[in-house]
Amino acid sequence: MIRFMTLLFVSWLMVGVAAADEAPIAGAVKSVDTSAQTVTIEVTTKGKTREVTVFLKPGAKVVKFARPTEPGKSGFVEQSLALADLKPGWLVSIETRHEGNKEVADLV
């Protein structure tokens, strides 16, 4: 029984660590550095504001969702952007994960 409970606890702990390791981060764009392939965003959680610098992996996608320009179409369409197209003040969501001591992303 103790062995089972230990195994259950360790499994639960591993799931929690894996879930905490990958998470979307949302906030306002503070700055963009195209040469370093980074975007710094201002994130507010639990009443505290902090800056997070996210490194984009080679081949990372930057997309925005916009209303379609074609008459009669509804919803949103995905439009590809360059990293340089991101502007300070824009609200973004970035799918990140930890690699070493950095936050890295494949999708902005």
Image (cartoon, rainbow, N blue to C red):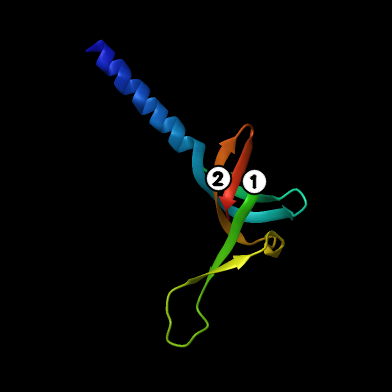
Horizontal side of residue 71 vs 38, given as left or right:
left
Residue 50's place in the image compared with 31, above or below, is above
Residue 60's place in the image compared with 71, above or below, is above
- The three-letter amino acid code for the residue at tag 2 is Thr
Q: Secondary structure at mark 1?
A: strand
Q: Residue at 61%, 43% (x, y): give it.
A: 104
Residue furthest front in the image: 59
Q: Which numbered disc covers residue 97?
A: none
Horizontal side of residue 29 vs 16, given as left or right:
right
Residue 98's place in the image compared with 7, above or below, is below
Q: Residues within 10 Å of mark 1 (few under 14, many from 20)?
A: many
Residue 55's place in the image compared with 21, above or below, is below
**First of labels 2, 1 by sequence position:** 1
Horizontal side of residue 29 vs 25, given as left or right:
right
Q: Nearer the viewer, residue 61 or 85?
A: 61
Q: Residue at 37%, 21% (x, y): give it.
A: 10
Cβ atoms under marks 2 and 1 closer than 8 Å? yes
Quarter of the N terminus within the rendering: top left
Q: Residue at 69%, 54% (x, y): give it.
A: 30
Which residue is denoted by mark 1 in the rendering?
A: 54
Residue furthest bottom in the image: 71
Q: Residues within 10 Å of mark 2 (few under 14, many from 20)?
A: many
Q: Which numbered disc covers residue 96?
A: 2
